[in-house]
Image: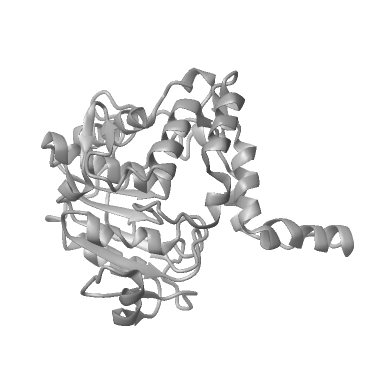
Amino acid sequence: MLDRGHSVFVISWVNPTSDHADKDFADYMKLGPLAALDAIRDITREEKANILGFCIGGILVTATLAYLAAIGDDRVNSATTLATMVDFKDVGEIGVFVDENRLEVLRAHMEEKGYLEAYHLQDMFSMLRENDLIWSFFEANYLRGRKPRAFDLLYWNSDSTRLPAAMLLWYLKEVYLENRLRQPGGLEMNGVKIDLSKIETPVFVLATSEDHIAPWTSIYPATQILGGEVEFVLGGSGHIAGVINPPTERAKYGFRKSDTYPPEPANFLTKATEMPGSWWPYWADWLEAKDGKTVKPRKPVNRGKYKSIEPAPGSYVRAN
């Protein structure tokens, strides 16, 4: 996006501690995207912004769009969600770890500390791909005495975060187990019942064909549920590699797109056109068609009450 001339702002989330135990999903919305939108408006003097969320961040974006629609706030120009489910009827392999009994175990486990430790998430995601993320290293190191091969995705996998008790328990019950996100009025954010069908903001929805965390067939229903324009793209590979697929001369994966979205995901496959290369330029073109005129590059530091703190990426991402 920087290469394409966009001003880019990124939320750097704090790693929760026991002080954040009572922070819920609505707090994430108020202190995350809504606060960020206020800051972006103050810094750029622009009334609208394009926003993006990845995985659970995309669920937060989707819920925020529905909340803004409910209160009549149109400050979002367009939204992009990456690997973001809207229908939790079939959550794939991750469903093995989410049921009512485990919810009660989690509740009891987090009662004292107020959060779920990061290593539990690391272990869960590793077990979803145990041949690649666990046993291949035992085989190479323990059985063969070899140094495990370099695997860049493990860097992402090991960079986990704690989750506050109130947010996690609400999210797992209301969204995962009871599938309330897609139900009109099924969820309440900041005292307001939300309805995804009321979202009129244009949304670019990316899914990836081999995603084991957010199955693409549970992402595709966004084409039927969201009330405004939806551009659905199905990339190759999985949850991380399919998203982080830059437009090089030898891009690893292509993508599928279509002008129409039949109700059933399987029918989308029969109608979709296969496109070579990265989905990034296609997305950038879509996004820029929604934008206004270009302006001179901004230097978004020391503007009003917003002061430069330290060089990027900042201390939050290094906090334990």
For the residue pair 131 and 311, the one nearer the viewer reads as 131
Q: Quarter-wise, where is residue 159 in the image?
A: top right
The x and y percentages for residue 153 are 59, 57
Q: Is residue 98 left or right of residue 24?
A: right
Image side of residue 289 versus residue 126, left or right: left
Residue 315 visible to an observer of this rendering = no
In this view, the residue in front, 296 or 314, is 314
- x, y percent for residue 252: 49, 74
> Whole-percent x and y of residue 306?
29, 27
Classify 184 as above or below 275.
above
Query: In which quadrant is the C terminus drawn?
Result: top right
Q: Is residue 319 left or right of residue 148?
A: left
* Residue at the extreme front of the image, as rendered: 101
The answer to whether residue 193 is above or below residue 273 is: above
Q: Nearer the viewer, residue 186 or 140?
A: 186
Q: Position of residue 81 (x, y in %)?
A: 33, 53
158 versus 317 height, above or below: below
Question: What residue is at 39 percent from the left and 42 percent from the top?
Answer: 178
- Res 65 → quadrant: top left
- Is residue 2 shown to the viewer in this render? yes
